[in-house]
Image (spheres, rainbow, N blue to C red):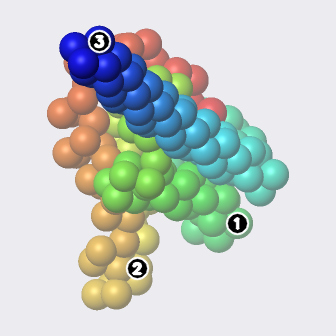
Amino acid sequence: MEIDLVISVVGATVGLFSVACSVWFSAKQLTLNRKTKTLEYVTGQFDRLAQLGARLELRKMGSQNILDYTAGDAEKTQKLLEYVYVFNRIGTGIFTGALSEDAVFNLWTPKWFEGHWRRFEPLIAQERKRRGEEARGAYVFFDWLVKEKCPSVAGKYPQKLATTQ
């Protein structure tokens, strides 16, 4: 009788251990899938910027002030605003949990996003002013990403500065 009890306990323990391992590995796989999907999405966004000519436009701008560079040129303005839209989508994804913060910030550091905010902030302010009341919430997730999220995680990610492209 005692041997049957020991066998039952051992069997139950092995079964519980097997279930626990399965749950743990499934969770790890889900995390990996989320990070992979994040990388695919975010790099796809930057590929799209290249296709639209926005990355080339940003390189042409160099260190000039963005408002001086665009100076009423609607095509330049639109191409550079595409960056703002991408950063806003990334901020939205991190805010909602749809994107993996780790995957994003290990590729592009908080300082990189902050540097881009400084470059694009005059253009964002100009766009908000131009669009009036309807633009009060425009680019709110890019704003949140830089002003709230980046400072709160700055010590968690590498401090290297990525290129501005």
User: Vertically, is 95 above or below 34?
Assistant: below
What residue type is disc 1 on?
Glu
Q: Are marks 2 and 3 in contact (CB under 8 Å)?
A: no
Of mark 1 and mark 2, the one earlier in the sequence is 1
Badge 2: how crowded within 10 Å, few (<14), some, or many (20+)? few
Q: Which residue is mark 2?
A: 130
Which circle, 1 or 3, is nearer the viewer?
3
Q: Position of residue 80 (x, y in %)?
A: 60, 55
Q: Which residue is mark 3?
A: 3
Badge 3: how crowded within 10 Å, few (<14), some, or many (20+)? few
Q: Position of residue 62 (x, y in %)?
A: 60, 33
Which residue is located at x 52 percent, y 21 percent?
A: 162
Q: Quadrant of residue 32?
A: top right
Q: Are marks 1 and 3 in contact (CB under 8 Å)?
A: no
Q: Which residue is mark 1?
A: 75
Q: Is residue 122 visible?
A: no
Residue that extends furthest to the bottom in the rendered view of this protein: 133
What residue type is disc 2 on?
Arg
Alpha-carbon span between mark 1 and mark 2: 16 Å
Of mark 1 and mark 3, the one earlier in the sequence is 3
Mark 3 element type:
helix
